Amino acid sequence: MGVLAVKLVYSVFSAMCIFCCSSMQLVHPLTMKLQANETDMMALLAIKAQIQHDPNQVTSSWNDSIHFCSWYGVTCSQRHQQRVSKLNLSSQGLAGSISPHIGNLSFLRGICLYNNTFTHEIPPEIGSLHRLQVLLLHNNSFTGHIPPNVSNCFNLTFLSLGRNKLVGEIPSQLGFLSKLQILVLQGNYLTGEIPSSLGNLS
Ligand SMILES: *[C@@H]1O[C@H](CO)[C@@H](O)[C@H](O)[C@H]1NC(C)=O
Ligand SMILES: *[C@@H]1O[C@H](CO)[C@@H](O)[C@H](O)[C@H]1NC(C)=O
Ligand SMILES: *[C@@H]1O[C@H](CO)[C@@H](O)[C@H](O)[C@H]1NC(C)=O
Ligand SMILES: *[C@@H]1O[C@H](CO)[C@@H](O)[C@H](O)[C@H]1NC(C)=O
Ligand SMILES: *[C@@H]1O[C@H](CO)[C@@H](O)[C@H](O)[C@H]1NC(C)=O
Ligand SMILES: *[C@@H]1O[C@H](CO)[C@@H](O)[C@H](O)[C@H]1NC(C)=O
Ligand SMILES: *[C@@H]1O[C@H](CO)[C@@H](O)[C@H](O)[C@H]1NC(C)=O
Ligand SMILES: *[C@@H]1O[C@H](CO)[C@@H](O)[C@H](O)[C@H]1NC(C)=O
């Protein structure tokens, strides 16, 4: 892909991430039930615990003083009001690893963590997120392999892992992602062939 095309794809992603996360303000804290289901709060706190560098202190709002649905970058579902539907912490200079507890946020539809400095592996637990449609992790420092378990996210339409330090082969299981529309893997250290299964992604 040429530089121009890559830039184009990235601006599409930025626009889309704004779209995917723009309903953030729609759920007002006062409309939420008083008795909170704390499953997602525990997962978010586990994610926060593994963020080692937060120069803009965006996760300092992730505390008891406000409901977790109002924490910075967190959007809750309108139908399931105590459940997180989007996580948008893009371009915040964050460093650390992504907690495997992210796989407990089972109502997530969008993850936007691109343009930070996250390291370590992409947690395979993301494969538990069956509602996930958008996964944007590009421009970080993720290492290890592309987890084949991502192919369990059967509703995924946008998968962007470009500009990381990923190694190994492209998992052929990505060919199971029948709804996939955009796949960005450039700028890694991937080896091997492009799996023929990707030809199934019409
Ligand atoms: C929270 O939600 C999960 C998944 O929907 C459910 O299994 C659990 O029982 C709920 N907990 C409470 C306290 O409502
Ligand atoms: C908790 O979050 C609130 C809301 O963002 C913030 O004003 C407060 O400083 C935070 N408390 C701590 C201890 O970080
Ligand atoms: C979500 O991410 C986009 C793209 O970086 C950003 O422009 C927007 O401000 C973010 N929204 C919130 C509420 O953080
Ligand atoms: C990436 O983040 C930096 C700050 O860390 C910001 O200056 C830059 O505009 C961001 N790029 C995109 C494409 O959001
Ligand atoms: C949350 O995720 C972790 C790591 O995958 C797991 O060990 C734990 O059992 C999960 N907790 C709940 C309540 O599902
Ligand atoms: C990638 O992220 C870094 C900050 O982590 C930022 O300085 C840089 O501009 C970003 N690159 C692109 C192409 O967005
Ligand atoms: C990965 O997916 C397989 C099924 O495809 C499952 O058995 C396994 O538990 C998953 N691993 C994690 C860490 O979620
Ligand atoms: C998958 O996405 C479609 C729309 O794109 C939606 O109707 C369906 O409920 C989603 N499935 C899950 C499990 O979220």
Image (tube, rainbow, N blue to C red):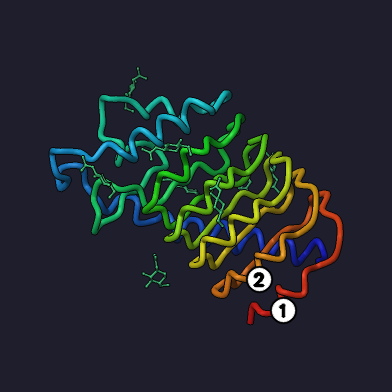
Cβ of mark 1 under 8 Å from ligand 7: the answer is no
Give the left or right position of residue 97, taking residue 42 as reference: right
Residue extending furthest toward the right: 192
Give amino acid for label 2.
Gly
Tag of residue 112: none
- Classed neighbour count for the residue bearing mark 1: other residues with Cα under 10 Å, few (<14), some (14–19), many (≥20): few
Question: Which residue is label 1 attached to?
Answer: 199
User: Where 86 sits versus 117, above or below?
Assistant: below
Q: Secondary structure at mark 1?
A: helix
Cβ of mark 2 under 8 Å from ligand 7: the answer is no
Q: Residue at x 80, y 61 (%)?
A: 3
Dots 2 and 1: beta carbons under 8 Å? yes
Q: Position of residue 95 (x, y in %)?
A: 61, 30
User: Where 60 sits versus 74, above or below?
Assistant: above
Q: Residue at x 31, y 39 (%)?
A: 39
The residue nearer to you, when weighing 25 against 137, is: 137
Give amino acid for label 1.
Gly
**Cα gap from disc 2 to disc 1, whole angstroms:** 7 Å
Q: Residue at x 27, y 36 (%)?
A: 38
Question: Which residue is label 2 attached to?
Answer: 175
Q: Quadrant of residue 21?
A: bottom left
